[in-house]
Amino acid sequence: MTQVVAECSAVHHHYGSTAALDGIDLALSGGKVTALLGPNGAGKTTLIHLLMGVLPVQKGRIEVFGSLRPGQRPAQRRIGVMLQASGVQNNLTVTELLDLFASFYPNPDSRERLLDELDLVELADRRFRHLSGGQKQRVLFALAVVGKPDWLILDEPTTGLDPSARRILWRAIDARRQSGASILLCTHFMDEAQKLADHVVVLNSGRVLDQGSPDAIRRRVASERIRARTSLSVETIRELPSVQSVTAGEDRIEILSRRGTETVRALLSADDGVEDLEVAAADLETAFLTLTDSARGAADLSVSATTEQEAA
Amino acid sequence: MNTASPSMQLIRAQWLNLLRTPDYTLPTLLFPIMFYVFFGLMMMRGQALWLLCTFATFGVMGAALFSFGVSIATERAQGWLLLLRASPAPVNAVIAGKAFGALLFALVTVVLLSALAAAFANVRLETAQWLGLAGILTAGALPFCLMGLALGLWLRPSAAPAVLNLVYLPMGFLSGLWIPSTVFPGWLQAVAEWLPPYHLAALALDIVGAKPANWTQSLTILAVFALAFAVMAALGWRRLSGAS
């Protein structure tokens, strides 16, 4: 299935004078898991709210399933959504919530099958308010998929989950993909995108910064942060393999690297006096800074290029 | 699986929610009953019929205002409303489910007060009058549902209960629901005659034969009031999709 589930062209969105989306052009192909990745405030939530039709399109155009506008009933019937930190009617039980949502769709999934799949059987008669965070997330996921949607939109589905609950959701998401559904997954976690997605779209400051396969994106994004005390100069370190950026701290130097082991090995062989070495996985925020910085760097370059041309 | 229609499911959800939040439901129900017991049954037994009409109006107003206003504001904050808006749940059924819940709540209030009046104050009415009283007061909850809906959509969730109380109690008092407006000074009586609870109570009083009412005038005022809040609610709903 290669058809396009959603197409955005020149989509802008403002809250008052703040631009949340600043010209999004994006086509989401069907039958795939697309991860929408980006730091907080990148515009992810605004974009998915536009796609599901709970926010009006201010500028630009969005079409879903060919020629439908987001929010039209025929489109909504084919979409299942799981919103970030969403609450539900707290006093309803899991079963009651599932029955309620099932009644909204023409051809709902079996309640028993879903309860079983998401490990909710024992919680079926418990009220939502009495569930733990991870249990709530699983119920919200069940509500998103009970209508057997063609397109599943998930906003940070595994934030705050313990590893086992996370695995249950990953398996359930993958099962939906296997059966041909398209999935849009907003996430904070690089490893989640890496594991589940066929395609990654990186959003930053309301723009599409980059997109491609998870591996391609990963290669462009720093993955490890190395700190050490060394006598090498910043310039020398920058030349070491896999280094993306180097900053001199007060007493230690900080290196962002695509492949930490490679960089560390080179660092140690270049300077046998390295001390206080520390290697950690770069969090996404940090990782994206390198992408953003390189984007800004490119912009600066082109600016200075034009200035030079003008000067000449 | 369950094949019930979305509307029935939404009504059921609203009902279950009301039944399972006694901390909110019971005070709303007990408030008018308590007042009626104090004033109608203990202090002014001679006025038991009159006070039945006015305190039932008061109860109906509370049921409608609170089951709409507070719950809409809370559900907005929870994200429940957003989830429903993103789903193919029919918007009308979401609102209708709430209205149905509020109207049943209103009916229960009226029935309880009527039972108290009949049992302890010897209030006797024709069957048609009992039914008429229940009918007009239940239907009369609608304008207050719209008011609750509008306020629930516009108010900050944390402010909603306080503001609703600030509307509910003074409006009930000024409409002469506790003390007949005939003992008010002239200018205050003029104010009362513009307030919707005054007119709903007037219709109830007419039905039980306590005081004739001007039906055209009272119905018009209730309808205008309902329309104004319907417009405000519609604007609030539109704002929801613009700002959330």
Image (tube, coloured by chain):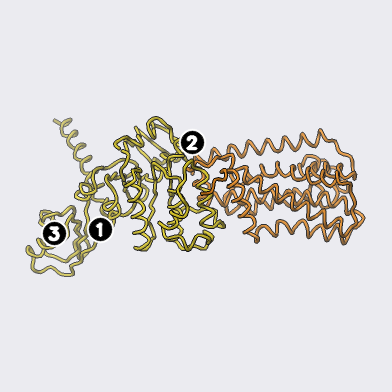
Chain colours: A yellow, B orange
Please, what is the three-letter code of the amino acid marked with disc 3? Thr
Please, what is the three-letter code of the amino acid marked with disc 1? Ala
Apparent side of residue B126 relative to residue B241 in the rendered image (left or right):
right
The x and y percentages for residue A61 are: 39, 31
Apparent side of residue A130 relative to residue A282 in the rendered image (left or right):
right
- Disc number for residue A263: 3
N-terminal-most mark, 2 or 3: 2
Q: How far is the residue under mark 1 from the one under mark 3?
A: 14 Å
Q: Mark 1 points at which residue?
A: A282
Residue contact at pointers 2 and 3, CB within 8 angstroms: no
The x and y percentages for residue B210 are: 90, 45
Q: Indicate the secondary structure of the residue bearing disc 1.
A: loop
Chain letter behind tag 1: A
Q: Mark 2 points at which residue?
A: A73
Q: How far is the residue under mark 2 from the one under mark 1?
A: 42 Å
N-terminal-most mark, 2 or 1: 2
Residue at image point 32% right, 51% down: A174
Q: Indicate the secondary structure of the residue bearing disc 2.
A: helix
Query: Relative to B65, does residue A130 appear above or below in the rendering?
Result: below
The x and y percentages for residue B184 are: 85, 47
Q: How far is the residue under mark 2 from the one under mark 3?
A: 53 Å
Q: Residues within 10 Å of mark 3 (few under 14, many from 20)?
A: many
Please, what is the three-letter code of the amino acid marked with disc 2? Arg
Chain letter behind tag 2: A
- Disc number for residue A268: none
Indicate which label's residue lies in the foreground, 2 or 3. Answer: 2
